[in-house]
Structures are given as C-alpha cells and as structure tokens.
Amino acid sequence: MRKISPGSSKNAEESALRLLTQRDHSREEMRRKLTVKGFAPEEIEKVLNRLTGRGILDDFRYAQRLAFYLTREKLFGPQRVSQKLFQKGIPANLAREAMGKAEKEMGTSERLRSVLKIKLKGRGLEQISPPERRKLANSLRQRGFLWEDIREIFQDAGGFAEE
C-alpha cells in the first residue's frame, strides 16, 4: 500500500470528489475507497466530515436513491434491498427509512406481481407444473421476497394450493 504524504487532505478530497462525480457513494464506501488509495485514517475522516458538512456526501440521499432504483427498476424484494443497502455501508436506521419511502412508492405485492408477469410470459400460474411453480417461488425468494408474500401472491393468482 502506498503511503500518502502528511498534509495530503487536498489530494484525499480531490480523490473523493472524483469518485463522487461518477456516482453517489455512502460514507462507508468512500472510507473504504480512500483507505485502499493509501490515505491516512485521520485525513479520510476530515475529508468525509467536510464533504458531509457541505452536503456533497449524504448517506440518506444515497440510500433513498438506491432503494428507489432497486425497488422500481430491479423489482427486488425488501430483504434484497436491505442486503444491498447494508453492503453499501448504509446505517440501519437510514436504510429502514429509505426502504419505507421506496415501499410507499411501489409496494411489495405490486413488485411481486410485476416480476410474476415477466417470469410467466403471459401464462397463468395454473398453466405451469408444480416443479416449475417451486422453481418460480425459489426465484422470487432469491430476489428478496418473503415466503409469506410469495404464498399470498400465488394463492391470489390461483396457482398455489396447500395440500
């Protein structure tokens, strides 16, 4: 790892700003990237505090944008969205708030119906075999939807009968 000379907060800030021109980052992501670049932890904290104070680095704004993108564009379930926010270093309280706002915009059941429509390609649940239904349910689970929500959507669509 290369060492950056003392008093290099200007370089650290320039590096951080360059990263932020490409896309938003969480405070934790920025910390990791600046650490890899070899900046001292004290300098990193100073830069992060300056950028946060100026409103350039904002974990909640980033969490909200990411949550909206993952729910509306990727059609992920709440667990997958939560996992992604955690991976990006978003604090739990901000992640919950961002997810709540995204959920109001496009609810879980609406996303599930959209994914189901795409996956079924015009067929009904009753038209696919039980193994295909299990595979579909597992696929929805991997997208971050809860079993309870999947079961409810399947029952509403008439393709999931408890035996």
Image: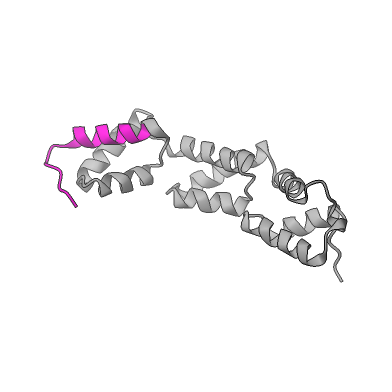
* Quadrant in which residue 142 is drawn: bottom right
The answer to whether 16 appears left or right of 125 in the picture is left
Residue at the spot 57% in from the left edge and 38% down from the top edge: 69
The verdict on residue 18 being magenta is yes
The answer to whether 25 appears left or right of 74 in the picture is left
For residue 92, say whether it is visible.
Answer: no
Instruction: Tell me the quarter of the image containing the C terminus.
Output: bottom right
The verdict on residue 105 being magenta is no
The answer to whether 6 appears left or right of 66 in the picture is left
Q: Which residues are magenta?
A: 1-20
Q: Residue furthest top?
A: 54
Q: Nearer the viewer, residue 98 or 35?
A: 35
Residue 133 to residue 118: above or below: below
The answer to whether 68 appears left or right of 111 in the picture is left
Residue at the spot 78% in from the left edge and 47% down from the top edge: 121
x, y percent for residue 132: 77, 62
Q: Nearer the viewer, residue 12 or 93?
A: 12
| Principal secondary structure, stretch drawn in magenta | helix
x, y percent for residue 120: 78, 51
x, y percent for residue 100: 61, 42
Residue 54 to residue 109: above or below: above
x, y percent for residue 85: 50, 48
